[in-house]
Structure formats: C-alpha cells, structure tokens
Amino acid sequence: MSPCTTSAADFDALVETSETLIVRFVTSETETGQDQLLASVIPSAVIAHCDVHQEPELAQRFGLVNESALLIFRQRIILYFEKGAHDVDRVAYLMQQISMLDMDKIRENIEKEKAAEALHLRRACPISRAKLMANNPST
C-alpha cells in the first residue's frame, strides 16, 4: 500500500481498517521523504504521516505540539509511541519485534488491567462503596 497522509478526520477509520499501522508525526515536509522507503521495507504495514502543524488537533491527542514522533498500532492496539525522529532501520527493527508479539496475550493482559483498575476505582470511590453497601447490607 502506498504511504498516505492522515488527519483528525480520517485517523480513527485508518486505525480501524489497518492490521498494522505506522504513523509518523512530522514537523517538516523533508521528514515525509522516508515514507516510500518505509513502505518498501515494511510492505505489510500501512504507512501514514501527520504534519503536526497542519493537524494540531490530532497531534495534541498524543501530547505533541511541535515535535516528531512515531506511533505503531497492531490490531488497533498502540504498541509503540515515542517522541523524536526514527530512521528507517529503527522502525524496521521495531516492526520485527512487534510482529513477534502474541496479540491474544496482549489483549488478555489489557482486559486484566482494566478489571484491576475498575476494582481499584470501586474500592477508592466512597459514593460507589456506599451504594454497594446499601444494596447488599451483608458486605
């Protein structure tokens, strides 16, 4: 697939429809020159870039103001995000590592973390605790 430009308007759809998505947040047009090389080195991934100056809303979703960054999704899960420029060799190495991950195990771990966080919030929230005790006096 040819590299593309992404914006706030189409970003979520791009994430949803891509098995593996590499998004490069760039601050200058010269940084987009690596897109075609990345696409040839990593043909299994969708390569996109976002100019942080033209799409500040999308960049700010990831805490970026005026800086480059690399974001990698696999099966709609963010597996890598780091500010700064990344050369083609670095991205290829990261993709090699990411391709070996067990995504079922990662999803399982995410669900466990969500459940643990929900339990912690229930324990920490006095209003929820009071409601729980009112509904179940034996607790």
Image: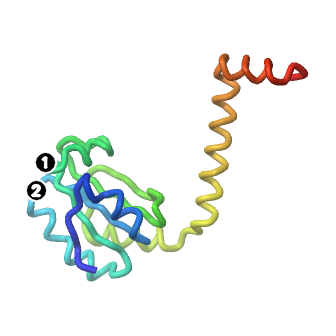
* Disc number lying in front (1 or 2): 1
> The disc labelled 2 sits on which kind of residue?
Ser
User: Are there few (<14), some (14-19), or many (20+) residues within 10 Å of tag 1?
Assistant: some
Depth check: 90 or 43 in front? 43
Q: Secondary structure at mark 2?
A: loop
The numbered dot on residue 130 is none
92 is higher (above) or lower (below) than 66: below
Residue 71 on image: x %, y %? 34, 57
Answer above or below: position of 10 versus 125: below
Q: Is residue 85 visible?
A: no
Q: Secondary structure at mark 1?
A: loop
In the figure, is residue 94 to the left or right of 139?
A: left
Specify how the rendered protein is coloured: rainbow
- Picture residue at 41% right of the left edge, 64% below the top: 16
* Point 27% across, 53% down: residue: 69
Residue sitting at x 21%, y 41%: 65
- For image coordinates 72% across by 20% down, the residue present is 131
Q: Quadrant of the N terminus?
A: bottom left
Q: Are marks 1 and 2 in contact (CB under 8 Å)?
A: no
Q: Quarter of the image for the C terminus: give it.
A: top right
Considering only order in the chain, which callout, 2 or 1, is on the residue closer to the N terminus?
2
Q: CA distance from mark 1 to mark 2?
A: 9 Å
The type of residue carrying mark 1 is His
How far across and how far down the image is residue 25, in percent?
23, 55
Say which residue label 1 marks.
Answer: 53
Q: Looking at the image, which is closer to me, 58 or 95?
A: 58
The residue singled out by tag 2 in the image is 28
Where is residue 30? Give x, y as percent: 9, 63
